[in-house]
Amino acid sequence: MDLSIVIPLIDEAESLPELTAWIERVMTENHFSYEVIFVDDGSSDNSWDVIEGLRAKNPSVKGIKFQRNYGKSAGLNEAFRAATGDVVITMDADLQDSPDEIPELRRMILEEGYDMVSGWKKKRYDNTLTKNIPSRFFNAVTRSMSGIRLHDFNCGLKAYKNKVVKGVEIYGEMHRYIPVLAKWAGFKKIGEKVVEHRARKYGKSKFGWRRFVNGFLDLMSITFVGKFSKRPMHFFGLWGTLFFLAGLGISVYLIVSKIMDSSFALTNRPGFYLALTSVIIGMQLFLAGFIGELISRNSSSRNTYLVETKTGL
């Protein structure tokens, strides 16, 4: 199959027929074999009934229905497991992403050799204060921390090689950082394409201000897990050593001062409590590192790596 088009949604019943017809037209014009995988993330409207109706008319339409709202990351992760196309396209269901972009995204994957291509909505129709400015800030932070030169990490319109979606696991709010997950999994050829952003035609946005807080926390998590999941002692041991040495140094200074001057009030000095706190924190970090190493070394996935090819085995 040429393409798997993955579309997570919640309460988008009005837009689904128009979006499906648009996708079908683009696929027919380009002679692509395809599947459309809708993921209903616990919609309260009749979105699932619409998906079943579309499935009855077009066998390329498939659906996954969640019992309740689990979030976009869970929807993408489940659809990625089911996708069979050589190239996997993700897009939003609100008609703000254009299916006309799909052929060029597929070409960039197959002909230019990208592992994934992320859309860049250079001209947006969102509220500048509540969406554009915070998005630019987080995109800048993510670029700085990940080293991936993308302008719009959270763009829903993306293209992937099939092996990329099978090689990453998405949870929490990690759908914003799939390029980072892909990079940590070893897929380093990540491209970008300017795509059309359309004004919302039906309904309203389902994302609130909490996505910025959750997104930032997830970025911290993914950065730590990507670098230190298999060697936690390298992180905790380093900081534990620094804190312990700082506390030890202050303690030595206080003891020498007491020896030199018997009237020196050791326990009345702020340095005494600072030294005590530093030593305790250092020891706790060391213990955290040791526990992390024990968990990592006894994990069933401790030697799980993504192998591109095997020959003669």
Image (cartoon, grey):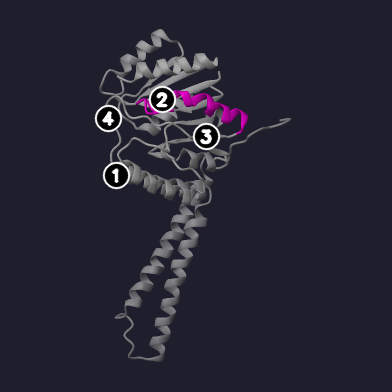
In 3D space, how far apart are the residues under numbered discs 4 and 1 (Cα atoms)? 16 Å
Q: Of label 4 and label 3, which has the lower sequence position? A: 3
Segment colored magenta: 91-113
Q: What element carries label 1?
A: helix
> Which circle's residue, 1 or 2, is located before the other in the chain?
2
Question: For mark 1, what is the residue?
Answer: 129
| Front position among marks 4 and 2 | 4
What is the spatial separation of the Cα atoms under label 4 and label 2, in whole angstroms?
Answer: 17 Å
Task: Please name the amino acid that badge 3 sits on.
Answer: Val
Q: What residue type is labelled 2?
A: Ile
Quadrant for the N terminus in the image: top right
Of the image marks 3 and 2, the number of the one nearer the N terminus: 2
Residue 168 in view in this figure? no
Residue 188 vs residue 238, the one in the foreground: 188
Q: Mark 3 points at which residue?
A: 117
**CB atoms of marks 1 and 3 within 8 Å:** no
